[in-house]
Image: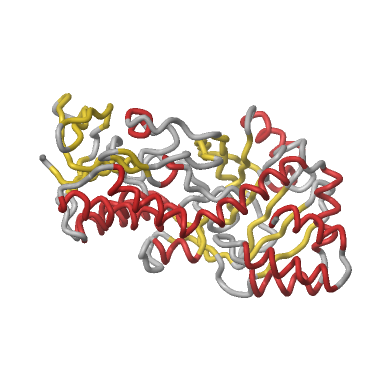
Amino acid sequence: MDYDVIVVGAGPAGSMAAKYAALNGAKTLLLEEHGQVGSPVACTGLISRNALDECELDEGGFINKRIRGAFVHSPNNRNILLDGKRTMAYVVERKIMDREMARRAVNVGAEILISTKAEGITKIPGGVSVKVTGPDGPEEITASVVIGADGVKSKIARAAGLGNLPHVCSAIQVEAAYEPRNPDFVEMFSGSRYCPKYFAWAVPTSGDCCRVGLLSDEHAHEYLQRLLTEHEIVSKKARSAVDLIMGGVPVGTLKRTVTDNVLIVGDAAGQVKPVSYGGIYTGARCARIAGEVAAKAAVAGDASSGRLMEYERRWRADIGRELMLMMRFRQMYGRMTDTDLNEALALLDDPEISEAMTKYGDIDRPSQLAFELLKLSRNRGMWRLMGLLAKLLF
């Protein structure tokens, strides 16, 4: 084999998988189809404090702002303040961040090829042949294990017979002149007229600018235009919108992320939180496991699905329960009318509940907060809120 492990895709999950494959003794190659790691950007650029830690990064030059909470608006524009009273998230420049992660993978021994697109894979005795097209034309590179970190349209997952993700929604945003209500807080909006079943956002970047966008199953451009021109709050603040970006966001995981000689990780596996729709924290955690398991399997000369299933068992044991809980929340949220959303926000507009959300709030692992709110609502006789939380948890 040319390599022990080939990782396809140099996003955060791919770079982390390559880093841990190299650290565990594997001759590792990281492939990136674009001419630059981190381009084009298809991300809001808001990552949690935990995500930064999972990526094993310090607060470097890719951080624009520190965020401590959010103003959450209901469809009738009532809002509550969720204040973490400390840095809860960072607004980052993904191009710089992604390149730093790839550099760190190379620093520990991984090789990298840019402008090299993986076209497909073929099983061969003892491994996999990856068909690539690079600056010098088509060629084939072999490895014991291939890790597919190639996004929501993963060619590696399909070629390996692992199928497609259950659902992919659209994320769209612009960079706009926009005076944030408070530059230390993001603003979140809901309502069927602007973001049915999902939410919209205004994320401060620098100066009087925000990234304004939304998630949608269809007609994303139409909903964004409506948000910018008609929303009671956003339309009065957003102007000079530039730098339109759009991308796909997985909703739900692959049924299986392992087969002989192949692992799937990150967005390609659907390892994305179906509440915030962020995937860097979850992808990085899973990628560390993927790189380790792939390397040890390759070095041991056994890259069968039975050996590689260690990856599947470990990542599902780690984050599977949280993803299931968040998927239940997404399903419940998707069925709520504007009237339901108005009522829910009114129920949450309570000092004791705000205190609990400040103390236990963790967007990466929300189960503890949900249980604390359930206990609080039961003790205070808040039956409607208790019913909603019980549906979510049980």
- Residue 133's quadrant in the figure? top left
Q: Is residue 40 left or right of residue 230?
A: left
Q: In this view, does 62 lie to the left or right of 326?
A: left
- Residue 306, percent across and down? 30, 46
Q: Is residue 367 left or right of residue 18?
A: right
Q: Nearer the viewer, residue 8 or 124?
A: 124
- The residue depicted at 24 percent of the width and 35 percent of the height is 115
- The residue depicted at 56 percent of the width and 67 percent of the height is 88
- Residue 301, percent across and down? 15, 48
**Count of picture labels:** 0
- Residue 68, percent across and down? 60, 68
The residue lying furthest to the top in this view is 138
- The residue depicted at 41 percent of the width and 46 percent of the height is 266
Quadrant (top left, top right, bottom left, bottom right) of the C terminus: bottom right
- Residue 308, percent across and down? 30, 48
Q: Nearer the viewer, residue 68 or 353?
A: 353
- The residue depicted at 36 percent of the width and 47 percent of the height is 11
